[in-house]
Image (spheres, rainbow, N blue to C red):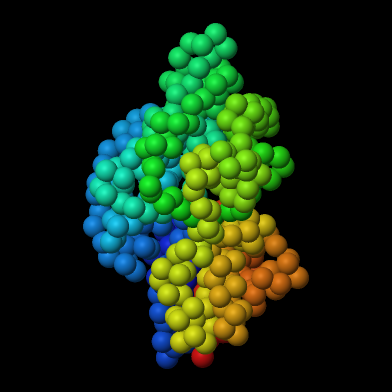
Amino acid sequence: MAPDKFAGTLTAVQAAAAIAEGWRRTSPDDAVVLLPLADGGPGFLDVVEAALGGRRAPAVVTGPLREPVAAAVLLVDGTAYVETAQACGLHLMPEQARDPRRTTSYGVGELIALAVAEGATTVVLGLGGSATSDGGAGLLAALGATAEGPEGLDVTALLSEGTSGLRSAHRVDLGPARRAVEGVRLVAASDVDNPLLGLRGAANGFARQKGADDAAVMEIEGALEHLVAVLGRRPDGKDPAVALGAGAAGGLGYALLHLGAERVPGIATVLETVRFPDRVREADVVVTGEGSFDWQSLRGKVVSGVAEAALAEGRGCVVLAGRVEVGRREYAATGVSGAYAVVDHLAEQGLPPEAALDDPAARLADLAERAARTWGG
């Protein structure tokens, strides 16, 4: 049982427990193994700590609206693991306050600085679940980047004000930020492979789910285009804006790539850490899931990583989700053997989709019970 979180309702740990409970109703003799996962977003640190142990270095950092929030860096043998959502996650904000034009990634830069101060020579950052769309400008400012306006005025503070202030920056000096992480290997473990700009970029692809309307999306896209024009290419001549994962976590991937980071798929990092292929070989079937099984699920999320691993070992992979919004032909190509939706199960009972929220764990357990009739022992 290797699900992701069901955003807004169940953590990955709670989802795995609910699936196991329902499965055992149908197949009580099955040996059920719980292995909740994360793709770099919320829960990343818990999953890594459960697999590797380590020491947490706690900190109070700047939250998405510049309020203090509690966070931590996990230290394991010279490597620091950072869950960026702890500093700029969407879960830190009430729904009515969400506006990705105003939110900052400054706290993520503070966590990187903490990791370096703790002696880490490698910093692995899980990207995902952010409330931000600032292209990582706040992160860069926290590490020492400075900005000037059209008349040479210092506008560095605007880098940490969300996208709303980015157009005022006509020159940005990344030198201090690069020196702050000199000699440190940065690894950006992103949950998606989207570029920074365009129809699949940070604004068009994800800003609406962070509280932006169509006008705000256009405003954010324009601000990010301006940031790209100001920052230009890296010293090696590469353009981070078009790189895979640049649009992850509201553009945090873009900022990290400017600092020389290596981008890796978040779920691949987690699966390697927990030795997932070894676990799959010992299983007959793998069950995964998330709140909405949609097109994003097939682009570097937990479900796609689990399905790929199951396919490689010749094991069946079943997806349980609140909603299933991709067709069988689409998901079968990724290694998913079957997909079941809570809302469809409720509809068969004459219940509305809203009933899924009455008791999410119970609804998911009921769905697992049904799936086990086909896939259980």
Residue 187 location (% of width, % of height): 46, 53
Residue 242 location (% of width, % of height): 66, 44
Residue at image coords 54%, 36%: 135
Residue at image coords 31%, 45%: 116
Q: Quadrant of residue 233?
A: top right
**On screen, residue 303 above or below 155:** below
Closer-to-camera residue (262/90): 262
Closer-to-camera residue (231/23): 231
Any part of residue 290 in sight: no
Furthest toward the front, the residue is 236
Furthest toward the top, the residue is 151
Residue at image coords 30%, 57%: 78
Q: Quadrant of residue 88?
A: top left
Any part of residue 66 in sight: yes
Residue 327 location (% of width, % of height): 73, 66
Left or right: 367 as drawn, with respect to 59:
right
Residue at image coords 61%, 79%: 311
Left or right: 49 as drawn, with respect to 306:
left
Q: Quadrant of residue 59?
A: top left
